[in-house]
Image (cartoon, rainbow, N blue to C red):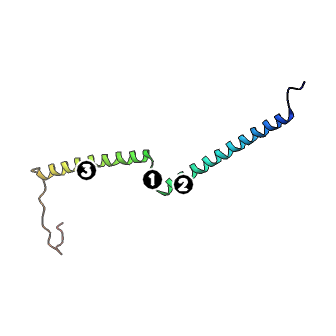
Amino acid sequence: MQTKSPAFDDLANLMTNAFGAVKGVGDEVKAAGRARAEAFIADMDLVSRDEFEVVKMMAANAQTEIAELKAEIAKLKTSPKAPKKRAVKPGAKPKK
């Protein structure tokens, strides 16, 4: 008595190969879709989250520095040793 049928073995091999091919095609479709999505995002000139956070931090630092400089300018303007502004006449030569 024979326990294996060559016809069933061939059919099983055929089905295994077919499922493998379908899985391969599915993987290729996913990869192509992912590539298209990445290209679409790249065309939109979007920035990454890391780049956004760096620029956000730079802007916050710049705002802090501007506030400090404004306070320093205001302090210098109200200082008794602040230099007086002189009006310069057009065409006048500076003194040596």
Amino acid on which disc 2 is placed: Ala
Disc number placed over residue 66 in the picture, else none? 3
Lower position in the chain sequence, tag 1 or tag 2: 2
* Residue 80 image position (x, y, % from top left): 9, 50
Q: Residue at x 58, y 50 (%)?
A: 33
Q: Residue at x 11, y 51 (%)?
A: 78
* Residue 20 image position (x, y, % from top left): 71, 40
Secondary structure under the numbered disc 1 in the rendered image: loop
Q: Nearer the viewer, residue 70 or 26?
A: 26
Q: Is residue 10 left or right of residue 85?
A: right
Query: CB of mark 3 within 8 Å of CB of mark 1?
Result: no
Lower position in the chain sequence, tag 3 or tag 1: 1
Task: Look at the image and tell me in which quarter the C terminus lies.
Answer: bottom left
Marks 3 and 1 sit apart, C-alpha to C-alpha, by 28 Å
User: Which residue is under mark 1?
Assistant: 46
Marks 1 and 2 sit apart, C-alpha to C-alpha, by 11 Å
Secondary structure under the numbered disc 2 in the rendered image: helix
Extreme residue toward the front, this view: 1
Tell me the crowding category of disc 1: few under 14, some 14 to 19, or many 20 or more residues within 10 angstroms, Cα based: few
Disc number placed over residue 39 in the picture, else none? 2
